[in-house]
Image (spheres, grey):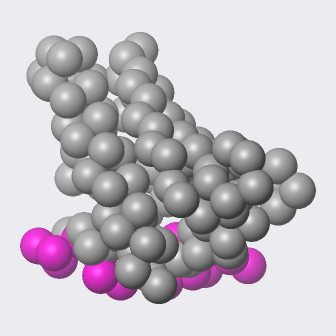
Amino acid sequence: MASTIASITIPASAERVWQLIGGFNSLPDWLPYIPDSALSEGGRIRTLANPAGEAIVERMEAFSDKERFYSYSILKAPFPAKDYFATIRVKPEGKDASVVEWSGSFTPVGVGDEDVIQLFHGIYADGLQALKKTVTAA
């Protein structure tokens, strides 16, 4: 199993950042790669569309509003990986800043570990940069 983690410091309180990203259906609000998200099964399953129109289906595995994190698994996606499990977490960094971490573990399928690590690390790092841009523009 391979894994990666990306993090970023954002000049906004953890409460403010979590307000934007803490909803399981909120990816289109801050992640340009995901223009659409729809919830089903009482909000536990989200079906995302990427710019190519491919479906990505994810299941919420854990959620804590108090600890500001959620974990999810991928049920269906156009990625060369299986057994995907990821967590997005917001931690306070003083009064007016926060650190957002996006981590994941997965088993590569048909490619090497480094290829999939680079793929997901790029998604996480680019996504966190987009999040910072969204938060600081508001």
Q: Position of residue 31 (x, y in %)?
A: 35, 69
Q: Residue furthest right?
A: 66
Side (left or right) of 121 relative to 102: left
* Residue 136, above or below 104: below
Q: Residue furthest front?
A: 95
Side (left or right) of 21 relative to 68: left
Point out the stretch of residues depicted in magenta. Answer: 35-53
Side (left or right) of 2 relative to 39: left
Q: Position of residue 35 (x, y in %)?
A: 29, 81
Residue at 26% across / 26% down in the picture?
Answer: 117
Q: Position of residue 10 (x, y in %)?
A: 51, 55
Residue at 29% across / 38% down in the picture?
Answer: 120
**Residue 103 colored in magenta in the image:** no
Residue at 41% across / 64% down in the picture?
Answer: 131
In which quarter of the view is residue 81 placed? top left
Q: Name the quarter where the N terminus is drawn.
A: top left
* Residue 128, above or below 20: above
* Residue 102, above or below 18: above
Specify whether residue 36 is in view.
yes
Side (left or right) of 52 relative to 60: left
Specify whether residue 73 is in view.
no
Closest to the observer, 1 or 128: 128
In which quarter of the view is residue 50 placed? bottom left
Q: Position of residue 69 (x, y in %)?
A: 70, 51
Q: What is the total number of numbered labels drawn onto the structure image? A: 0
**Residue 51 colored in magenta in the image:** yes
